[in-house]
Amino acid sequence: MNALLIVDVQNDFCPGGALEVPNGDAIVPVINKLLPRFDTVLQTQDWHPAGHSSFASSHDGKEPFDTIGMPYGEQVLWPDHCVQDSEGAAFHPDLDTSQSQLIIRKGFRKQIDSYSAFYENDDTTSTGLSGYLRERDIDKLFVVGLATDFCVKWSVLDGLKEGFRITVVEDAVKGIDLEGSVAQAWDEMQVAGAARIHSSKLL
Ligand code: VGL
Ligand code: ZN
C-alpha cells in the first residue's frame, strides 16, 4: 500500500516566514493536485516549544545558521520558527489538509531537534511512524514538502533504513540550500535508494 507523506508545509517555511524556503509555497498547488491519487495522506508538523535548543536565540553569541555541538552531534542553529500554536507553525493556508489521516508533530522536546518523520536527531528516539505504517500495511511512501535538504532528506533516509520504499516527487519539494546542501541531499537520497519522479508521472 502507498501513502503520501507531506513534510512540514508550514507558514514559517514559506516566503514571509521565519525560516523561509525560497519559493516554498510553489509546491502547495502541486501537492493539492496529488491528493486524489492517494488513499492515505500523512503529514508532519515542526512543533517547537519557545526557547528550543535548535534556536540560535537560545545560545549566547550565536547567530542563525551557525552550528553547535549537541550531545547527539552537530546541530545547525535556526531562527526561532514553528513555535507551538503560533501562526508560523500553522500549515500553509492553501494546503488542503482535509485528507490527512495522521499528523506527526516533531521537535517538541526542548533538548533534541527532530528533522526526520521517523527519528529525532539523536537517531534513537522514535516518532512511532514506522509502527503506524506497518500496522496499516503501508510499504511505499511518496514524499513531498519542505525542506529538501533537512526534514525531507532525513525522513527519506530514515524511511529507507526502516525498509520502506520511497519516491521523492521532485517538483513538490523545495530546499533551504546552505552551501550546496540541496544537491548533496539529492545525491544522498538517491545513493540510499530513493526514487525521484515528476508529479506529472502520478497524475
Ligand atoms: C526544518 C530546519 C529546522 C525542515 C525544520 O522542515 O526542513 N529545517 N526545522
Ligand atoms: Zn525546526
Image (cartoon, grey):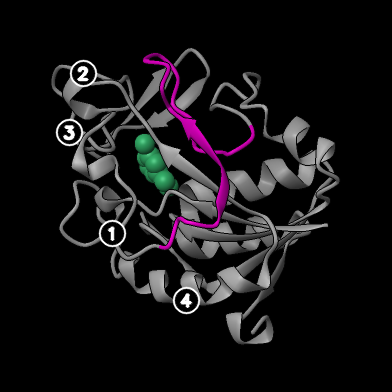
Indicate the quadrant containing the N terminus: top left, top right, bottom left or bottom right: bottom right
Q: Earlier in the sequence, mark 4 or mark 2?
A: 4
Q: Quadrant of ligand 2?
A: top left
Tag 4–tag 2 contact (CB < 8 Å)? no
Q: CA distance from mark 3 to mark 4?
A: 34 Å
Q: Residues within 10 Å of mark 3 (few under 14, many from 20)?
A: some
Label 2 secondary element: loop
Image disc number at residue 93: 1
Highlighted range, magenta: 96-118
Residue 113 x/y as whole percent: 44, 26
* Coordinates of residue 10 in the picture (x, y in percent): 33, 50
Disc 4 marks a residue whose amino acid type is Val
Q: Secondary structure at mark 4?
A: helix
Amino acid type at circle 2 is: His
Point out which mark residue 59 bears: 2
State the residue position of label 4.
30
